[in-house]
């Protein structure tokens, strides 16, 4: 196998418990996003656009949809004879089987995969964030500074610091300390869960971590603190663009709504940095004479006979006559009958909604209503959160 | 469907679309918001399960080659079989192209080297969604030499110029065919697709060439209606015949009927095309869209009515598009008005401009022009 300068390890085993009904049958990275994509498309497209052609995808929770979606990686131009996408589920070894016990352990269990490419650097990313980032710029910075580990960070609102891994840095962006979900944060610089390591350094830490029975085998909780303790050179790489953790129903809804701005920070129309996805081969969308669409993102294969306002429609959605959809996210192949009102609702793939239903609550401060995939809502039903 | 190979015959000169085919073959004329005409024929073959297809080209094939690539979108990037691009095998500069049969003869090895028993030959200007399995079974069961596919259209309402019409008897046998509506006006329109046994096809090609006959339809089929058993199989779904700029426009506009939209794009199979990875289309607050087909990657801020927008079209605030077809990446400036027009790819209409065409004779604006 030809040596690779850098390969990516993409953590995609997350259960995404806080996404409720949306992750009953699929892992969080496979949750649909933005009218066309699945969340993992963003990191895979980032890899491809950054010139990283070898990506190991670590799966564990409900992997079927994700595995079949990834295929041989061709939608992301990652169908390569040397490298490409490799799905890495937990497996049985001579001493028995082991689930991935933590993010670091997942990488540790796949040392053989990494060693096949004998890389100099390793990029560790997670498949549940929405952002566009050139990992190559981060790598060049890592090399220029002679770092052993570089961690991408972003400024978050102070009130949200308790949800993130928070870093304290000096004037030269050397990382001084790292606290996982602190109650009283010293800074508002959050780790984005994007790491570049020198592979030989990481390998030794992973091996030692595996031998430590008290470790939770997690990058944020164990590996990074240990490296800081031992005064390794850890640098921060500042990122200023759009980045969103879509781990909750609220943040998933918000991230979708962000795209509806006239000039969204996350520009999907940027031809220099396309986000690739598996194509369902549907025809252009049809907006009927009585239909209308405003402030919305609508994908191919949709038929709109009603009115769609400030909403995201995935492919193959049908909206019946005199129906109104507002502030909502309608996932693929949902069929909506006539005279239906839908407000601030996320509707899972393949759901059928009868006529004259009212779903969700109107108003900016109303809670989000969630309807799981393949549900059936009979005519004349009222559903709200 | 292991026992059949496909041929898409583009070897017949076809200048009926004027401006739209100035720099491209008819097979690569954009249609239906995101497709090219050849996509329908290729998808029909893919959905039938045919995994070996030859495209006999003539000229202006740059855009066609670019579009087809390795044939991946139609599942034709195969180790066994796959897509064969076969341009005319004639010597330049003294080339003298005599007809599409010459092209078949030049690539006779494509047929000789195949093991499959049957060949389906199609062209690309008849737009339909068909699974050829039933037609092939009909061909086998009826022990025909040649089975021609046809569709029943109303000759009073559809322009059938340059089309062959068939006279079919009660045993499905073709008794007569003609491209002259004064001779035959049955409404049984030959879809320029037929099924034939491979060995018979090879024999007939060689026979025709030996007798200096070079037109596939006329020499190989028409002249042999009495000699061979030539049957007809009726296709019952939607058919659009693209034989003039006006028919291109009218047939495009028919897609705004939801029944036609469903019938052509979903039944019996999906239609595949080259993927562009455009994001979903975006409608801004001021957008006012109705009765239109919009492909992905569009940004609509103005008014769009009875129109078809291909991928990546941008319509600025206050602009009005009515009864028009805008191909890939057209940009319409603020307050511009476009009515009854066909805009080829990447046309830019500056702010405040007004372009009014005539619905019965739509005007085509040349690719990449700025007005």
Image (spheres, coloured by chain):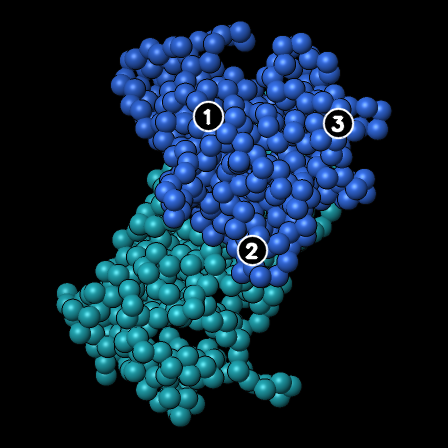
Chain colours: A blue, B cyan
Q: Disc 3 or 1, which lies upstream in sequence?
A: 1
Q: Quadrant of the N terminus of chain A?
A: bottom right
Q: Residues within 10 Å of mark 3 (few under 14, many from 20)?
A: many
The residue that label 2 is drawn on is: A116
Please tell me whether mark 2 or mark 1 is closer to you in this view. Answer: 2
Furthest toward the bottom, the residue is B210
The residue that label 3 is drawn on is: A175
The residue that label 1 is drawn on is: A16
The image shows residue B221 at horizontal and vertical percentages of 32, 77
Q: State the CA–CA distance, disc 2 to disc 1.
A: 31 Å
Q: Residues within 10 Å of mark 1 (few under 14, many from 20)?
A: many
Say which residue appears at 39% left-offset and 92% top-offset: B211
Left or right: where A176 falls relative to A68:
right
Tag 3–tag 1 contact (CB < 8 Å):
no
Q: State the CA–CA distance, disc 3 to disc 1.
A: 29 Å
Residue placed most toward the observer, B221 or A101: A101
Task: Indicate which disc residue A127 carries.
Answer: none
Q: Disc 3 or 2, which lies upstream in sequence?
A: 2
Badges 3 and 1, same chain = yes
Q: Residues within 10 Å of mark 2 (few under 14, many from 20)?
A: few
Q: Chain of mark 3?
A: A
């Amino acid at each position: 196998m030809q040596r690779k300068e850098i390969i990516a390890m993409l953590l995609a085993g997350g259960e995404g418990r806080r996404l409720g009904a949306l992750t009953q049958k699929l892992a969080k990275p496979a949750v649909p996003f933005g009218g066309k994509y699945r969340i993992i498309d963003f990191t895979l497209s980032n890899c491809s656009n950054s010139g990283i052609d070898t990506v190991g995808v670590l799966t564990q929770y409900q992997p079927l949809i994700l595995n079949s979606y990834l295929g041989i990686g061709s939608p992301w131009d990652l169908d390569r004879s040397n490298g490409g996408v490799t799905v890495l589920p937990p497996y049985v070894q001579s001493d028995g089987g082991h689930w991935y016990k933590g993010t670091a352990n997942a990488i540790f269990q796949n040392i053989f995969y990494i060693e096949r490419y004998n890389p100099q650097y390793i990029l560790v990313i997670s498949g549940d964030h929405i952002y566009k980032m050139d990992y190559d710029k981060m790598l060049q910075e890592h090399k220029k500074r002679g770092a052993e580990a570089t961690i991408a960070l972003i400024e978050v609102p102070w009130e949200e610091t308790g949800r993130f891994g928070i870093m304290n840095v000096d004037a030269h962006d050397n990382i001084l300390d790292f606290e996982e979900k602190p109650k009283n944060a010293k800074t508002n610089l959050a780790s984005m869960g994007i790491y570049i390591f020198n592979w030989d350094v990481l390998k030794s830490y992973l091996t030692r971590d595996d031998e430590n029975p008290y470790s939770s085998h997690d990058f944020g909780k164990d590996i990074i603190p240990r490296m800081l303790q031992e005064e390794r050179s850890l640098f921060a790489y500042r990122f200023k663009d759009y980045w969103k953790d879509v781990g909750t129903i609220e943040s998933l809804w918000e991230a979708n709504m962000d795209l509806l701005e006239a000039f969204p920070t996350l520009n999907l129309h940027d031809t220099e940095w396309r986000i690739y996805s598996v194509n369902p081969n549907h025809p252009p969308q049809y907006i009927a004479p009585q239909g209308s669409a405003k402030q919305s993102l609508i994908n191919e294969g949709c038929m709109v006979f009603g009115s769609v306002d400030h909403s995201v429609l995935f492919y193959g959605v049908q909206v019946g006559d005199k129906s109104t959809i507002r502030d909502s996210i309608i996932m693929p192949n949902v069929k909506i009958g006539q005279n239906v009102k839908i407000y601030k609702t996320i509707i899972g793939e393949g759901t059928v909604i009868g006529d004259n239903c009212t779903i969700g609550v109107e108003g900016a401060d109303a809670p989000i209503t969630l309807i799981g995939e393949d549900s059936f809502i009979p005519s004349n039903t009222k559903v709200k959160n | 469907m292991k026992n059949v190979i496909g041929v898409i015959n583009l070897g017949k000169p076809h200048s009926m679309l004027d401006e739209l085919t100035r720099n491209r073959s008819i097979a690569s004329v954009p249609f239906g918001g995101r497709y090219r005409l050849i996509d329908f024929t290729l998808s029909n073959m893919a959905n039938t399960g045919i995994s070996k297809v030859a495209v006999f080209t003539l000229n202006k094939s740059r855009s066609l080659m670019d579009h087809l690539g390795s044939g991946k979108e139609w599942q034709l990037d195969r180790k066994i079989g796959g897509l064969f691009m076969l341009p005319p095998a004639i010597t330049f500069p003294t080339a003298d192209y005599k007809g599409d049969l010459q092209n078949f003869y030049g690539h006779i090895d494509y047929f000789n080297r195949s093991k499959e028993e049957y060949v389906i030959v199609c062209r690309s200007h008849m737009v339909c969604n068909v699974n050829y399995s039933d037609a092939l079974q009909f061909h086998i069961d009826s022990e025909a030499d040649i089975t021609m596919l046809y569709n029943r259209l109303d000759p009073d309402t559809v322009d059938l110029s340059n089309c062959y019409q068939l006279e079919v008897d009660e045993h499905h046998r073709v008794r007569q065919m003609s491209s002259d509506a004064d001779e035959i006006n049955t409404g049984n329109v030959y879809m320029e697709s037929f099924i034939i046994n491979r060995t018979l096809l090879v024999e007939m090609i060689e026979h025709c060439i030996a007798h200096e006959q070079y037109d596939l339809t006329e020499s190989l089929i028409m002249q042999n209606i009495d000699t061979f058993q030539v049957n007809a199989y009726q296709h019952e779904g939607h058919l659009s015949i693209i034989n003039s700029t006006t028919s291109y426009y009218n047939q495009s506009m028919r897609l705004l009927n939801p029944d036609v939209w469903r019938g052509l794009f979903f039944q019996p199979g999906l239609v595949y095309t080259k993927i562009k990875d455009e994001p979903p289309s975006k409608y801004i607050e001021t957008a006012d869209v109705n009765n239109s087909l919009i492909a992905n990657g569009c940004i609509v801020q103005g008014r769009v009515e009875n129109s078809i927008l291909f991928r990546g079209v941008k319509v600025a605030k206050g602009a009005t598009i009515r009864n028009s077809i805008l191909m890939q990446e057209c940009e319409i400036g603020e307050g511009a008005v476009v009515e009854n027009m066909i805009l080829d790819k990447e046309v830019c209409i500056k702010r405040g401009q007004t372009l009014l065409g005539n619905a019965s004779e739509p005007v085509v604006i040349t690719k990449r022009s700025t007005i």
